[in-house]
Image: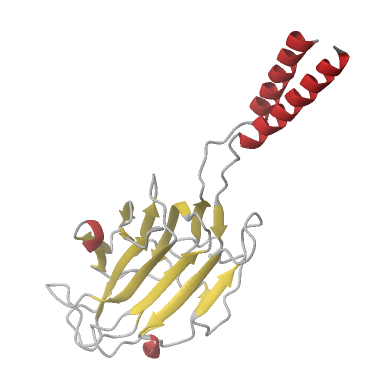
Amino acid sequence: MGLFKQSCGKILSQLVLVALCILPFQSHAVILDWDSVNWSSGNLTGSFDIDSSNPGNDITITISGATGYLAQDVNDVTDLTGGYNSPAQQALFMNMNYDSRNSTLIVTVTFNYAQGVQDVSFSLFDVDRSNAGSDSGYTDKIVLLGKNLNNTLVAPTTITTSSDNAKTGTGTNVYVYGTDGASDTSSSGNVGYGFTGTNTINSFTFTYGNENSGSYAAPNNPGNQWISLFDITYTPRPKVPEWHPGLIASFACMMMAGARRVFF
């Protein structure tokens, strides 16, 4: 009988450990904070290890397309603050001088997680329009879409515009364009994006160019224009409910108490 008790007690102890192992782990938000990382000035790609629970680089940003029209080196600076002025916040700055309103810069952000990520949110600063109707004018245009684990295009769940820009279209055909001039230190040119809810993505890409038709069209040879990509927040998959440590401890105690009543 003593041997039976010992065996049952050992089995129950192992069951407790298994139960604790299969309880949901806490999900955790990760942020790419430009004040905490460094983009090598002039580079067109950058990778960052910001999540201690995920080995290796967690996020990679690649810039392609009309890179020959960059007016200065890409860098994380405070040239555009998006209204975050006390203190000013760094963001990835891209300054363009296109020779055609049909040219675009392409920015791709890839999340290096096997199961993708959720609850992605970030902002672009200074999406606006300047010198309307003049040869030095421009009308910023942003087309932004994500890709899921099946490599299918996914539209943002939310797009939040400001006083100096607007959005048009629906689904994967939506885009944002500038409507008026925004100060470099104001939030009036900000655009917020989110991939929330059940949307799981492994990357998003946006093109930065000019509106080329309609009443807001930029001139054929636009003037100097710029935007910044601000901090990116996301939650790695699998996303599971958070369990309070007290609940886990209570569960273990109840199982052990039950074992004592049954076998001892």
Q: Residue lying at the far right in this picture: please name it.
A: 2
Give coordinates of residue 204: x percent, y percent: 39, 64
Q: How many marks?
A: 0
The residue positioned 41% from the left and 61% from the top of the image is 123
In the rendered view, would you say 11 is above or below 128?
above
Q: Which quarter of the figure is the N terminus placed in?
A: top right
Give coordinates of residue 77: x percent, y percent: 53, 74
Of 257 and 170, which appears nearest the observer?
Answer: 257
The residue positioned 33% from the left and 73% from the top of the image is 207
Of 133 and 208, which appears nearest the observer?
Answer: 208
Going by the image, does 127 lie left or right of 239?
A: left
Give coordinates of residue 240: x percent, y percent: 52, 40
In the rendered view, would you say 197 is above or below 110?
above
Going by the image, does 114 lie left or right of 25?
A: left
Which color mode does the image show? secondary structure
Give coordinates of residue 47: x percent, y percent: 56, 72
Q: Which quarter of the figure is the C terminus placed in?
A: top right
The residue positioned 30% from the left and 69% from the top of the image is 142
| Residue 51 can be seen in this image | yes
